[in-house]
Image: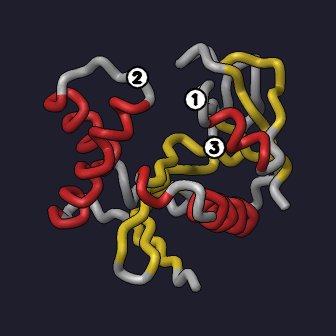
């Protein structure tokens, strides 16, 4: 039986940051980053340093009891994407389950947690830009649909789902 816990990363907590880095570098390499580990580490630091500035922004380490299984980074998008998406949609920016815990329901459990959190923040819809090979099938299985729109930042298709 799973006992999922979601721990908000605190920007001044070096232990949490080190735990994140153990996953962050492999995650970005897995999705195709060609950046050096030092650049990837700097990017992680920038993401962690903005924590605590908004109540509706979450960067969480995900555990089953005391075993770390992944991380997620998501927020209510206050600005939207100009001429593409209106503001106040939930936005799943980063989502990672360690390879040894995939296909065991952890991804679905983490997603349900994110959806509940978006609901509590009043978001009616959520969106993401999935990685094509493994990400798109996973997110489609959870009810996300390709909107036919392209994110102007990363040039990936935008998938949308109603928050339930």
- Report the residue marked by disc 1: 131
Residue depicted at x 24% and y 49%: 21
Q: Is residue 142 visible?
A: yes
Residue designated by label 2: 32
Number of callouts: 3
Percent of width and height locating residue 34: 30, 18
Task: Reply above or below: 143 against 106.
Answer: above
Q: Nearer the viewer, mark 3 or mark 2?
A: 2
| Sequence-first tag of 2 and 1 | 2
Q: Are marks 2 and 1 in contact (CB under 8 Å)?
A: yes
Query: Would residue 121 be seen by someone viewing this image from the given angle?
Result: no
What secondary structure is marked by label 3? strand
**Which of the marked residues, 3 or 2, is nearer the chain's N terminus?**
2
**Height in image: 84 above or below 21?**
above
Kindly indicate the quadrant of the structure image that contains residue 2. bottom right
Q: Nearer the viewer, mark 1 or mark 3?
A: 1
For mark 2, give the secondary structure: loop
- Tell me if 83 is positioned left or right of 7 in this view: right
Residue 57 percent coordinates (x, y): 51, 55
């Amino acid at each position: 039986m799973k006992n999922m816990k979601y721990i908000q990363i605190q920007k001044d907590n070096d232990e949490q940051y080190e735990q994140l880095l153990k996953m962050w570098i492999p995650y970005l390499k897995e999705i195709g980053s060609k950046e050096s580990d030092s650049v990837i580490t700097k990017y992680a630091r920038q993401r962690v340093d903005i924590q605590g500035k908004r109540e509706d922004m979450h960067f969480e380490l995900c555990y089953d009891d005391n075993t770390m299984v992944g991380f997620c980074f998501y927020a209510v998008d206050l600005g939207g994407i100009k001429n593409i998406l209106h503001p106040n949609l939930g936005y799943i920016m980063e989502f990672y389950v360690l390879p040894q815990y995939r296909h065991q329901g952890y991804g679905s459990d983490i997603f349900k947690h994110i959806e509940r959190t978006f609901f509590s923040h009043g978001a009616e819809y959520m969106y993401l830009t999935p990685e094509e090979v493994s990400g798109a099938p996973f997110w489609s299985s959870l009810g996300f649909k390709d909107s036919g729109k392209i994110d102007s930042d990363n040039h990936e298709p935008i998938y949308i789902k109603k928050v339930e």
